[in-house]
Amino acid sequence: MKMTYDEFAAWIDEYFEVFNKYGQDPDEIHRMDKYFSKDVVYNPYIAYVGKVEGRENWYKVLTSHPSGIERLTPEHLVIDERQQVFVAQIRTDIIDRDTQELLLTKRYLCRYPLVEEEGAMKIARLDFFWEILPTGALEIDDVFERDWKKNPDGPQRLES
């Protein structure tokens, strides 16, 4: 089952909409099963951030920082219909869950190869790069570590 360009574009729009609503909510995370394959691999090209294999492990990462929520807005997309892959330049706003205050904005560049699973196209891998913010700027880890310190068994950064 291959998607046409228009089907791909609609799938991407739906994915980001659903991710922003449910993708970091532990009670709703399994709504993302429609988009992530069982064997999805999160493959970051970021120092001290480790690879995550498997959908359930990926969900643990997504829900490991409940006080800081990522809101993803694709700014530019490249869709490769032949290879069934898309690349997204994404503006990410990190929002404080309780106050709804914007804490920081950062850009991601992500490559999403898809695979057919159970008759639907799903994300097989997420190759992930992120913007380096200026020295002294509030960073994602500054926000997420608020939660990671409360849960020492969570998916923290790898030790250097």
Image: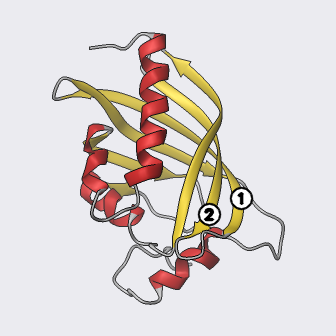
Which residue is rendered at x = 33% and y = 66% of the image? 60
* Mark number, residue 156: none
Q: Is residue 41 above or below residue 70?
A: above
Q: Position of residue 53 (x, y in %)?
A: 31, 54
Q: Position of residue 47 (x, y in %)?
A: 60, 64
Horizontal placement of 11 versus 139: left or right? left
Which residue is rendered at x = 57% and y = 48% of the image? 72
Quarter residue 90 falls in: top right
Which residue is rendered at x = 45% and y = 22% of the image? 10
Circle 2: is it few (<14), some (14-19), or many (20+) Cα within 10 Å?
A: many
Quarter residue 155 falls in: bottom left
Residue ID for mark 1: 105
Tell me the kind of residue under disc 2: Ile
Residue 37 in view (yes/no): yes
Circle 1: is it few (<14), some (14-19), or many (20+) Cα within 10 Å?
A: some
Quarter of the image that includes the N terminus? top left
Residue 54 in view (yes/no): no
Front position in the image: 64 or 25: 25
Secondary structure of the residue carrying tag 1 is strand
Most extreme residue toward the left is 118
Tell me the kind of residue under disc 1: Thr
Quarter of the image that includes the C terminus? bottom right
Horizontal placement of 121 versus 10: left or right? left
Residue ID for mark 2: 94
Which residue is rendered at x = 27% and y = 52% of the image? 55
Front position in the image: 111 or 9: 9
Secondary structure of the residue carrying tag 2 is strand
Front position in the image: 45 or 118: 118
Quarter residue 153 falls in: bottom left
Q: Position of residue 143 (x, y in %)?
A: 60, 76
Q: Position of residue 11 (x, y in %)?
A: 41, 26
Q: Is residue 66 above or below residue 6?
A: below
